[in-house]
Image: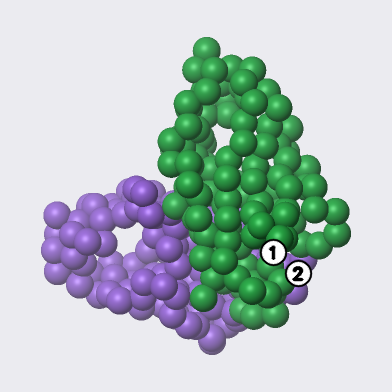
Amino acid sequence: NAGVTQTPKFQVLKTGQSMTLQCAQDMNHEYMSWYRQDPGMGLRLIHYSVGAGITDQGEVPNGYNVSRSTTEDFPLRLLSAAPSQTSVYFCASSPGWGSKGNEQFFGPGTRLTVL
Amino acid sequence: AQSVSQHNHHVILSEAASLELGCNYSYGGTVNLFWYVQYPGQHLQLLLKYFSGDPLVKGIKGFEAEFIKSKFSFNLRKPSVQWSDTAEYFCAVKSTGTASKLTFGTGTRLQVTL
């Protein structure tokens, strides 16, 4: 299994540009999520999905959109990039809701810089 | 809402020293607890987890953590650190019975010197 994969690894955008960060998992996990990591702030949840067709907002959803058309893929869209969105973005997945399903597996991250 | 506090932001230790990193959470119900490690330039990896049962949990690479319910704590320990333990450590909590949302602490950067 490849686990959780993310593309691209690095991206530089100009303010106002849009882009999509890709995330895919091959473990048939129901639950997927997006976090952003900023110095001194840990990881903050942006959006999550508990299954195909179901998404919900996390702690810091503004400026981001998600969709979940398949179990495997969970792309994150930046509609109009702002410098405040400069961060490292991690995608994660877990088997489901139960106690054994609470362990999350993380992708390698995407480092995004918005100028 | 649940929250996690990691009071040590930056810890510097010499090799072979003992390690204890603090983690406190706030939530009134049943929780699952995790410690993740992020080595320089890498993604997060699970060190250990507590779901139920024995409150002393052993993880990979000689790490362990003790869940003390009365203190809402889940401190990470290692008797003797190595230079390769240099990394950032994140405590995380998830309340049971709800959608799987993890809440992370702000992290502790551990630097081990030779």
Give the residue displayed 48% in from the left and 32% down from the top. Answer: B11
Q: Left of B64 or right of it: where is A50?
A: left
Mark 2 neighbour class, 10 Å CA radius: few under 14, some 14 to 19, many 20 or more: some
The residue under label 1 is: B32
Of helix, strand and loop, which one carries label 2?
helix
Task: Determine the residue located farthest toward the top in the rendered image.
Answer: B114
Of helix, strand and loop, which one carries label 1?
strand
Residue A68 picture location, percent across and down: 50, 79
Give the CA separation, mark 2 to mark 1.
8 Å
Residue A6 in view in this figure: no
Look at label 2 and name its amino acid.
Answer: Ser
Mark 1 neighbour class, 10 Å CA radius: few under 14, some 14 to 19, many 20 or more: some
Which chain does purple denote in the image? A
Task: Determine the residue located farthest toward the right in the rendered image.
Answer: B53
Label 1 near label 2: C-beta < 8 Å? yes
Which chain does green denote in the image? B
The residue under label 2 is: A99
Task: Determine the residue located farthest toward the bottom in the rendered image.
Answer: A53
Look at label 1 and name its amino acid.
Answer: Asn
